[in-house]
Amino acid sequence: MQIAELKDTNIHYREDGDPSGAPVVFANSLGTDLRLWDQVLPLLPKGLRIIRYDKRGHGLSSCPPAPYAMGALVSDLEQLLDHLTVKDCLLVGLSIGGMIAQGLAVKRMDLVRAMVISNTAARIGTPEMWQQRIDGVRDGGIEALADPVMERWFSKSFRRTPALEAWRNMLTRTPAEGYIGCSAAISGTDFYTTTASLTLPTLAIAGSEDGSTPPDLVRETADLIKGSRFHLIRGAGHLPCVENPAEYAEVLTKFIKDTGHA
């Protein structure tokens, strides 16, 4: 188990692949940990240095008191990459991980040479919506939100499979304080202006059945970045790397190769 002691929190991370390879960094969604990418990684090209981590309040990382600011989540990843002496990575972020990616790409151009923003946007939802979810978790725990979240995350066909229980368990076992903290960070984030200033190679991925960040919202964010690409994974929801890891890995591999990262 690898723990990075950062300025104001401890972050659990994992490295796979070739330590001297080109770095590819993965940032997870709200209510998941670094296992989100388990099915995709074996399908990627060999020779990459693959880095995953649990954001604060999730997985095995520290869980400071809520609320969190998006700037703190961006700083956590920034400090982690500095700790690991990573430069010029390809950064893959899903949902809140995609917001963190946008924030870091603006802040530290030396750290991020290309970006994949998956099932995310420059702004997600409204402060009122997030406050309702925060209040719901305060009142009834994450369990109270679990079934509606599963409906937004996964397609109908996936929700009929035994695998759904594992993802529901991962969500409900997330510390309530961490879920609330990151929900507050999303609520307070609007990256439209800053993301529109980016010029780095960018791939946006959406799922046709995504109830959290619908394809049009993802495409709208991709369109802010000059020269970006957009890919729709049909039949998948908010976590297409779970529902269709083969297609996810295929489009990611092509982007890795096209950007000269492998």
Image: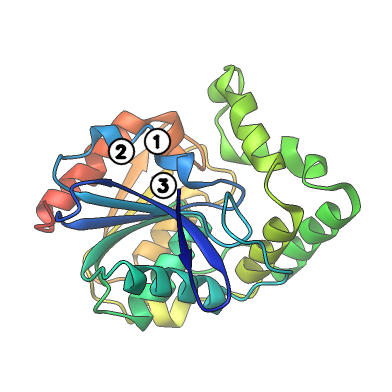
Identity of the residue drawn at 65% across and 72% down? 68
In the rendering, at what x and y percent does residue 211 appear?
Answer: 59, 44
Instruction: Label 1: state its secondary structure.
Output: loop
Mark 1 vs mark 3, CA separation in Å? 19 Å
Say which of 23 and 201 sits in front. Answer: 23
Identity of the residue drawn at 71% across and 52% down? 175
Name the N-terminal-most of marks 3 and 2: 2
Instruction: Label 3: state its secondary structure.
Output: strand
Within 10 Å of the Cα at label 1, are there few (<14), some (14-19), or many (20+) other Cα atoms? few
In the rendering, at what x and y percent does residue 253 appear?
Answer: 19, 43
In the rendering, at what x and y percent does residue 125 appear?
Answer: 64, 62
According to the picture, the residue beneath numbered tag 1 turns out to be 38
Mark 3 vs mark 2, CA separation in Å? 19 Å
Q: What residue type is labelled 2?
A: Leu
According to the picture, the residue beneath numbered tag 2 turns out to be 41
The label shown at residue 206 is 3
Name the N-terminal-most of marks 1 and 3: 1
Q: Is residue 159 left or right of residue 82?
A: right
Q: What residue type is labelled 1?
A: Asp
Residues under numbered marks 1 and 2 in contact, where contact means CB atoms less than 8 Å apart: yes
Residue 224 visible at all: no
Identity of the residue drawn at 70% across and 41% down? 173
Q: What residue type is labelled 3?
A: Ala
Instruction: Reply above or below: 76 against 137.
Output: below
Label 3 or label 2, whichever lies nearer to me, is 2
Mark 1 vs mark 2, CA separation in Å? 6 Å
Instruction: Label 2: state its secondary structure.
Output: helix
Q: In this view, does 145 lie to the left or right of 225?
A: right
Identity of the residue drawn at 78% across and 60% down? 134
